[in-house]
Image (cartoon, helix red, strand yellow):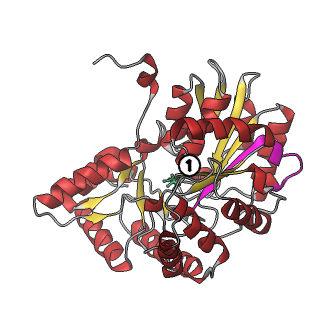
Amino acid sequence: MRLAQRMHGIGTETAFEAAARARALEAEGRDIIHLEIGEPDFDTPANIVAAAHRALDEGWTHYGPPLGLPPLREAIAADARLRKGFDADPDHVVVTPGAKPIMYYALLALVEEGDEVIYPDPGFPIYESMTRYAGGTPVPIPLREENDFRLDIDELRGLVTPRTRMIIFNSPHNPTGSVLTRRDIEAIADIAREHDTLVLADEIYGRIVHDGEFFSIASLPDMAERTIVLDGFSKTYAMTGWRLGYAILPPDLVTPFSKMIINSVSCTSSFSQMAAVEALTGPQGAVEEMVAEFRQRRDLIVDGLNRIEGIRCRLPAGAFYVFPNVAGTGLSGAEFANRMLNQAGVCMLAGTAFGQLATDHVRISYANSQANIRRALERMAELVATLPAGSRA
Ligand code: PLP
């Protein structure tokens, strides 16, 4: 079949493919430990599930307004005032089925042929893919291990040209778990103001911070009017399958987003949105417990990885991922991930699932029990011990 030209630039997210390969091995009877997953392994908190039941009983089963239900847009704005530290207006909030469509809408609405979009490498693969799809030129900013996977501000400054339309950053970061400092974010804001670029701030892991503090660029002077704040419910409230995300937009983007929503999905599920109101306004204890458990697992996995000869792993400050360097085993990240899956039954992703640069790394998600993390570490150590000794650092 002849596909439209625009399909040539579109990429994918290999996490879904790795999970499918792991499931195929499981179907053959293999025991696989899943460390490839980009979602909390916790259940959605019971109060949120109960709110969805109530909403269904009350008949929240119809189309809603394209931009989202007013009580949810208000709850999101109130939450942003509290946690993101800026005076968010409910009229500038749009609710979407997951946060991913926000990347799609923002890039399609704003990027013209030849416009440049700076995005992190390694980074969430959809930034690059959707920039190409929109006709733009993706410009990677490397995130280096020696800088704790934070972007280098001087390097960012050097990448900005008169064609730079947007700077995308993500803190806390997938796949490395890095968290930008307030100073980093202030410097990004200075560059955006100076060169009149837009910013897409992916704050989806903003509540999952283990060291330091979350900081929103939209709280800085004049930044809310040039920033698309992307956030959602998938990670914070373990609600990936509910498909609930949101953006807080510069005022001029609200009508274009409304048109994009009307042309694609019409609106987000109404009963999911009612549950989201409970998520934001109800008790937050379950989130705090989840983050505390993630922190223990992070310490466990980083310590365990650093004990394996040939692997070195930084201590990430946020999210639920580690991004170890496996070059000392003599294998590339992709070879390492393949062998771990096929020979040791531990599924993880190659660093190159997140761009071109991280060839020596793998992404391991610790959204799995401490018992399974221990088992995975044992299997990894056993397999690494069978590799030729000379290749190990
Ligand atoms: N942004 C980042 C960095 C992510 O890792 C993800 C999900 O993996 C998303 C956005 C999108 O999440 P969702 O569409 O489930 O809200």
Is the residue marked by circle 1 packed among few (<14), some (14-19), or many (20+) residues within 10 Å? many
Q: Which of 249/164 is in front? A: 249
Q: Is mark 1 on a helix, strand or loop?
A: loop
Query: In which quadrant is the N terminus drawn?
Result: top left
Query: In which quadrant is the C terminus drawn?
Result: bottom left
Res 206 quadrant in image: bottom right
Q: Does the residue labelled 1 lie within 8 Å of ligand 1?
A: no
Res 287 quadrant in image: bottom right
Residue 388 in sight: no
Residue 268 x/y as whole percent:
54, 53
Where does label 1 land, which residue?
267
Task: Determine the residue positioned at 73% across, 29% down.
Answer: 160
> Which contiguous range is marked in magenta?
219-233
Q: How many marks on residues? A: 1
Residue 98 x/y as whole percent:
52, 53
**Can residue 134 be found in the magenta stretch?**
no
Task: Determine the residue positioned at 65% across, 31% down.
Answer: 109
Residue 62 in sight: yes
Residue 50 x/y as whole percent:
49, 79
Task: Determine the residue positioned at 64% across, 35% down.
Answer: 259
Left or right: where does residue 261 sit relative to residue 320? right
Q: Which amino acid does label 1 sit on?
A: Cys
Left or right: where does residue 329 sit relative to residue 171? left
Left or right: where does residue 376 sit relative to residue 43? left
Left or right: where does residue 210 sit relative to residue 391? right
Which residue, as the protein is rendered here, is positioned at the far right?
Answer: 221
